[in-house]
Structure formats: C-alpha cells, structure tokens
Amino acid sequence: MEKMRAALFENHGGIEKLEYAYTEVPYPGPHEVLIKVKACALNHLDLWTLMGMRGVKIPLPHILGCDIAGEVVERGSKVKGIPLNRPVIVCPGISCGKCAFCKDGWDSLCSDYKILGLQRNGGYAEYVNVPERNIIPVSSQLSYEEWAGVPLVFLTAWHMLVTRAALKKKEKILIHAAGSGIGSAAIQLAKLLGAHVLTTVGSDEKIKRAKSLGADEVINYRKKDFSIEIKRITHGRGVDVVFEHIGPDTFAKSLSALAKKGRLVTCGVTSGSVVNLDLRFLFVRQISIAGCYMGGFRELKKVVRLIKKKKLKPVLDKVYPLREAPSALERMRSRINFGKIILVP
Ligand code: ZN
C-alpha cells in the first residue's frame, strides 16, 4: 500500500487532537476518482467535526476538509470522460442524484446526503477519494489555493441569497462578519444581485477590506450595537434580509434589524445553536425565517461560471503548509482572518 501524509485525528476533541501522520492512499471505487489535493480550504464545519457532533457518524481515524482543489490522478473502473491531471474542484456535498430532492436541485435534503470531510474523509491530505459526479473542471485563471476557497462558501451564499431569500435589486441586506469566508462571498454575491449591503466587522482594520468587496456600509460590532446602527442607517425601517451564520450572539438583534415582512436566512451557529425567540415579534411584523444547509450541485456550477467570468472572486486570508493545520485552525477559531484560510499538502 502506498502511503500519504495527512492531518488526521483518532479521537474527538480540540485542535491538539490533530496529528500530521502517514496513512494509506485511498483506492477509488468503480464510480470514484482519486484526487491529488493541491489545496484545501478550512471551514468552521471542520472544528465542529473535530469536536464531534451528536447524531452524526464520523468514521475514525478521520481526515477533515470539504473544500478541495486538485487534479484527478486515477479513475475508478467505471469512470469515463474525466481527464487526468487537469485542474478540478470538488462539490463538497455527496448525494444519490436520483431521489426527488436531488432531481429538484435540493441535494442537501437527500436521505443519503454526506459532506466530504464530515461523514467521509476529506482534503487535509495529499490524496482524497471522491465520487466522479462531484468533479467540476475549472480553469487555470485562478490558483489552486483560490479555487479551494470557492465551493462551500459560494455554494452556501448562493443557496441562501438566491434560492432561499430571493434577494432583489435595491433591497437592503445585513450580512454578518465580512471577514468570514461566507461573509466575503455573500457580500460579493449580494452586490452582483444589485442589493444595498450593510455588513459587520470585529476590527477597524477590516472596514477597508469589507468596502473593497463592495459593502456599502460597514459597522464595527465591537464598538457599536449593530441593530441600533442598522435602524439609524435605514431611518428606522430596518433591512429586507439578514444573512445569519452566528447564532445566539446575534440572532435576537438580527431579527430586530429586519423591516416589516423581512426575511432572515441562516446557515450556521458559530456562537452556539440555541436562541430565544419572541414569537409575537415574528408574527406581528410578518417575518420569515429560512434555514439553509449547503446547496445543490447545479447551484455550485452557476457559481463557478460567475467566477470564470470574473464576477465573483474568492478572498484568501493565509496559506499554510498542511503540517501546520493546527495553527491554521487556531487562526480561524480566533476570527482574526479576513477570507479563506488554505492548506497546501
Ligand atoms: Zn438524493
């Protein structure tokens, strides 16, 4: 058996559980391909996976990483039409492709839905095995590091803004945490859709960068209460849409920042998963809340087309060698990053 280097863990826990070790190179099944990983982006999901999640079966030892860019170097016996040694990215969600949800483009509702690096090994390694139908060919106009910063955040942002919130031209939207990977993707996409974007940052140094992505108004949430600022900026009306991915730290104020008939879309819980909700506020103001979980393969293809046309661009924070995966995760956890953190094997 051939060996490869990987950042893996044998037991759930904190970042200290991660080891840089040798493991076997996986062998592709009939409808799988072997990817030589050139770059893999970090996501908050990795920290949750490392800690372990109730009700989610994570095989041990385990390799994290769902955002993969690389080249196909080996094809399963039944794989046809996928060229070798060309740049590709991998759709992070794996589904059956046959059920009603999959056919409708709602892959993440498939009963067989799995995420790379969560229920099966991911890209914190030199090689990874993935289903052939998850491969998306890309161009060399972006580096592998940049391409790795695309799949999860742009796919989720698209599903939230286009499919769930149906964000329209001239609507006002609050996007939390411009410096997060998902925030930096959502700001660009919301601007492309013609919306007026208000966003938050945790330090003054990030204000300029948020504006360079297209944000119209930037609020330092450590200095000012963002919900009061939103009311001030919108002359008491509030925003049409809130893009939530934080949880209890922001949720109640996110709701209060909404205009009447406003929509809140949520995809993540970086500060915890239980919130207080005053239902009276919800029904009197006729507010909608929509849950979002990743997105569909077709949505990711639309995103890739827009990136190839240079309408959207992944924002990179810092690139680390794979052996420094613990430092990279620590950087993400401390939230000092602006954009995606990338590992290179
Ligand atoms: Zn399905």
Image (tube, rainbow, N blue to C red):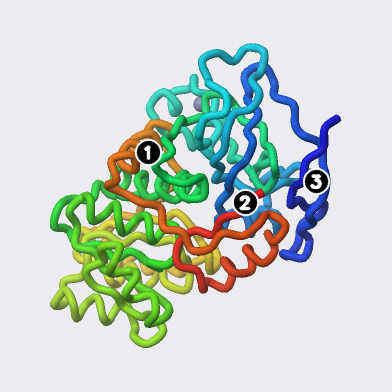
Q: Earlier in the sequence, mark 1 or mark 3?
A: 3
Q: Earlier in the sequence, mark 1 or mark 2?
A: 1
Q: Quadrant of residue 255?
A: bottom left
Q: How many marks?
A: 3
Q: Amino acid at mark 2?
A: Val
Which residue carries the number 3 mark?
61
**Residue sticking out furthest to the right:** 1
Q: CA separation, marks 1 and 2? A: 21 Å
Q: Mark 2 CB in 8 Å range of ligand 1?
A: no
In this orientation, which residue lies closer to the viewer: 118 or 211? 211
Q: On the picture, is 263 further left or further right than 252? A: left
For the N terminus, the quadrant is top right
Q: Amino acid at mark 3?
A: Pro
Which residue carries the number 1 mark?
304
Q: Quadrant of residue 343?
A: bottom right
Q: Secondary structure at mark 3?
A: loop
Q: Amino acid at mark 1?
A: Val
- Verify CB contact (< 8 Å) between mark 1 and mark 3: no
Decide: few, some or many residues near mark 1? Use Cα within 10 Å; few <14, some 14-19, many ≥20.
many
Residue 40 in percent (x, y) is at 58, 48
Whether residue 293 can be seen here: no
Closer to the observer: label 1 or label 2?
2
Residue 176 in percent (x, y) is at 37, 67
193 over 231 or under it: above or below: above
285 over 295 or under it: above or below: below
Residue 94 in percent (x, y) is at 56, 32
State the residue at coordinates (58%, 40%). Answer: 115
In this orientation, which residue lies closer to the viewer: 217 or 12? 217
Closer to the observer: label 3 or label 2?
2
Which residue carries the number 2 mark?
344
Q: CA separation, marks 1 and 3? A: 32 Å
Q: Earlier in the sequence, mark 3 or mark 2?
A: 3
